[in-house]
Amino acid sequence: MNDKNRLSDWKDESCGSNFSETDKSSSLIEADDSLIEADDSPIEAGDSPIDCGAAVEPKGNMNEPEPDFSLKSPKNFSYPKWLKSTLPQYFNPALWMAVLFFVFVAVGYVAGYHSPEIFNSLPQFDNLSDSGSFEIMLYIFLHNSGILFALIFLGFFFSVLPVLIVIANGFALGIAAEAFIRYEGFAFLLTGLLPHGIIELPLILFGAGIGFQLGVRFVRFLLSQIGDNQSARRIAADRFKKDFLNAAGIYFFFLLPLLLVAAIVEVYVTGTLLDMFF
């Protein structure tokens, strides 16, 4: 208790307290269980005195609003920060879409192996041997843009369409891959898919993840409109509106430019490699 008494006396003196010795003793007894033990080391010169009446000021301005990088606040908009805050929420749905896609690639490959004639039922695409064709590049870009548009903006109808498109494209790619390997070889398949596929395929699967996520949010929005809680209905509506605008921003300002790059690579790089080696 000696250290506690010395600490209490020093604090009373520094704060200008007029407590009597009796008041000090009773106060120490009442606060004995919660009083912080003083260190054995003496107080060094230059230490700041204790200000009993001053509150601890938090670091930073608590009233300062957090920066809003959403599309509806163009004044504070930052493209890199907006992407960093928006994209991660779609990683898990895109991962599940990728798993579903490759499962049906394997299913299509097995189906094509056992029934080679099924390859003739697939849509026949233009040959890319005419490398350097701007018309083919534009066609591929618009075609993939339409698929991505359907994945995202029609996906919020209960998430069904993105799943069906991923399944259909995975199955078709598996059948085509088996046919190309059988007739042209594995090297031809890699040359025809790898240069642009490493850009295009992740974009398509990511768009499917966005559409699936929007579908989940849309279902939650519909369920919230059934109840009588006006606050919950308003929050759900604002959340879905924000998600839809973010998805639109990702489509127009992130995915479409990369799809254009993929289309250019497919025509001017993939087509050139196929002409050179096959």
Image (cartoon, rainbow, N blue to C red):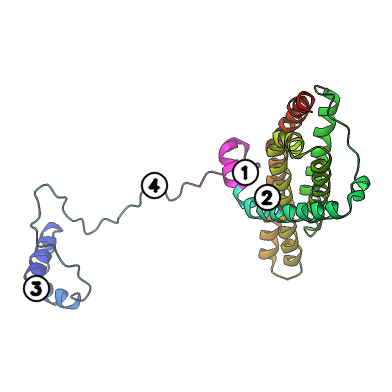
The amino acid sitting under disc 3 is Met
58 on left or right of 248:
left
Q: Provide the secondary structure element on which disc 3 rests.
A: loop
Mark with earlier residue (2, 4) = 4
Q: CA distance from mark 1 to mark 4?
A: 23 Å
| Percent coordinates x, y for residue 187 in the rendering | 73, 36
**Closest to the observer, 241 or 194:** 194
In the rendered image, which residue does mark 2 sit on?
A: 242
Give the image quarter of residue 100. Answer: bottom right
**Closest to the observer, 186 or 234:** 186
Q: Is residue 258 above or below residue 225?
A: above
Q: Which mark is residue 126?
A: none
Q: Which mark is residue 1?
A: 3
Q: Is residue 36 above or below residue 186?
A: below
For the record, the magenta segment spans 60-87
Please tell me whether residue 79 belongs to the stretch shown in magenta: yes
